[in-house]
Image (cartoon, grey):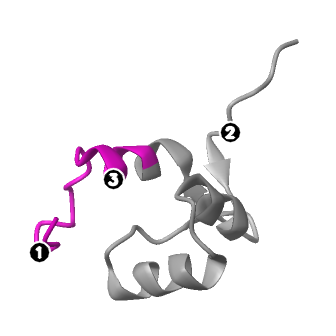
Amino acid sequence: MGRMTPIAVAEKGAAQLLDMKPAEFRELVAQGVLPRPRKVGPFERWDAEELRAVMRGDFVDGFEDVKW
């Protein structure tokens, strides 16, 4: 089996996807610039494709006030 692409990532992985330190990532989430995590049982995970969409400028649902 080849390498798997994650569909959900923990905070550290989400920050790594965006080449940020976890503290920088947390701050942008707190500011509402980046989406909040979703609960998967007791875990908080970010949708990896949603983060990619933010970087492409495709993700606007609920983020209309963000100045890109």
The answer to whether residue 33 is left or right of residue 16 is: left
The answer to whether residue 58 is left or right of residue 48 is: left
Q: Which residue is mark 1?
A: 65
Which numbered tag is attached to residue 6? 2
Residue 7, relative to residue 14: is it above or below? above
Residue 34, relative to residue 53: is it above or below? below
Q: Is residue 53 magenta?
A: yes
- Identified at 71% across, 67% down, the residue is 12
Q: Position of residue 65 (x, y in %)?
A: 11, 74
Q: Is residue 6 magenta?
A: no
Which numbered tag is attached to residue 12? none
Instruction: Identify residue type, mark 1.
Output: Asp
- Identified at 68% across, 39% down, the residue is 6
- Identified at 38% across, 69% down, the residue is 34
Instruction: Quadrant for the N terminus, please.
Output: top right
Q: Earlier in the sequence, mark 2 or mark 3?
A: 2
Crowd tier of the residue under label 2, counting other residues whose Cα lies within 10 Å: few below 14, some 14–19, many 20 or above: few
Q: CA distance from mark 1 to mark 3?
A: 14 Å
The answer to whether residue 55 is left or right of residue 22 is: left
Instruction: Identify residue type, mark 2.
Output: Pro
Instruction: Quadrant for the C terminus, please.
Output: bottom left
Crowd tier of the residue under label 3, counting other residues whose Cα lies within 10 Å: few below 14, some 14–19, many 20 or above: some
Q: Which residues are magenta?
A: 52-68
Q: CA distance from mark 2 to mark 3?
A: 17 Å
Instruction: Identify residue type, mark 3.
Output: Val
Residue at the far right in the pictured view: 1
- Identified at 40% across, 67% down, the residue is 35
Q: Position of residue 49 (x, y in %)?
A: 47, 41
Which numbered tag is attached to residue 54? 3
Q: CA distance from mark 2 to mark 1?
A: 29 Å
The answer to whether residue 39 is left or right of residue 43 is: left
Q: Earlier in the sequence, mark 2 or mark 1?
A: 2
